[in-house]
Amino acid sequence: MRILIVEDDAGLREVMSRVLSEESYQVDEAADGEEGLYFAQTGVYDALVIDIMLPELDGISLIRQIREKMMDVPAIFVTAKDSVDARVEGLNAGADDYLVKPFALEELLARVRALFRRNRGIDTEMTLRYGPLVLANHEAIVEGQHVNLSAREYALLEYLVLHKGQILTREQIFNRVWGIDTEAVGSVVDLYVHYLRKKLSAFGLDRHIRTIRSVGYTLREE
């Protein structure tokens, strides 16, 4: 699961990022609203955590622009404003939840988990199944045998399984698995698909990953 944090307080942003990363979420960070909008438009995220009082572009304007572009990624506002009017304004603008500063980091984690369950029907501790393949707790198992995957290979396989039957562009895969803030280049997608196919070949699953010429890849329906 990939989360974008848009927060101008560097200390708070770093703490939130660390805590979410420790829970195995992939986290990108933006320090102002304009940067946050760029990340949201060019990346693939499962959730947004947005401060309302942001430089360049405030959080209310940010979420409105995101929603105007028909992006339905769930979002939590974090803010020091605790009035009913402020909460109503944020929710009406397109946020799904509201967290008032100062807050316990355990509450942030709980609200993120609840957001996934409520808005996407996804359990953050879910088990994914694809034929004989089981993905759970960052482990891939086929008929009782562990598939030795790196963290990046696992993230790639998880993304393919979550979107089986869909054609995913190389850009979508790159943004989801590697993120915006990376020194990697787009060609790394082809390299890791090669790695993944090689490791799945022992189980006869490599042929299920189809190459869509000049576009990307798809994991065929079971």
Image (cartoon, grey):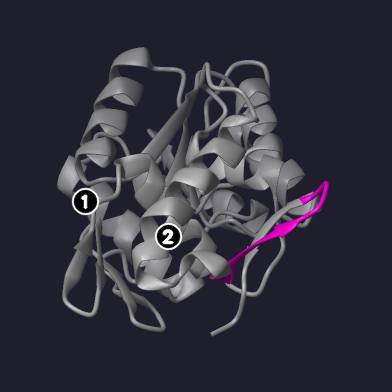
Residue 187 is left or right of residue 140, and the answer is right
Residue 25 is left or right of residue 118, and the answer is left
For mark 1, give the secondary structure: helix
Rendering coords of residue 142 (x, y %)? 27, 74
The residue shown at (62%, 39%) is 43
Q: Which residues are magenta?
A: 208-215
Rendering coords of residue 214 (x, y %)? 83, 46
**Along the line of sight, the residue nearer the viewer: 76 or 213:** 213
Residue 67 is left or right of residue 137, and the answer is right
Between discs 1 and 2, the one toward the N terminus: 1
The residue shown at (63%, 28%) is 58
Rendering coords of residue 20 (x, y %)? 27, 40
For mark 2, give the secondary structure: helix
Could you classify mark 1 by the number of other residues whose Cα lies within 10 Å: few (under 14), some (14-19), or many (20 or more)? few
Badge 1 vs badge 2, beta-carbon distance below 8 Å: no
The residue tagged 2 is: 158
Residue 188 appears anywhere in the view: yes
Residue 154: in magenta span: no
What whole-number distance in Å separates the C-alpha atoms at marks 1 and 2? Answer: 26 Å
Q: Which amino acid is tagged 1?
A: Glu
The residue tagged 1 is: 107
The residue shown at (76%, 42%) is 65
Q: Which amino acid is tagged 2?
A: Glu
Rendering coords of residue 199 (x, y %)? 37, 54
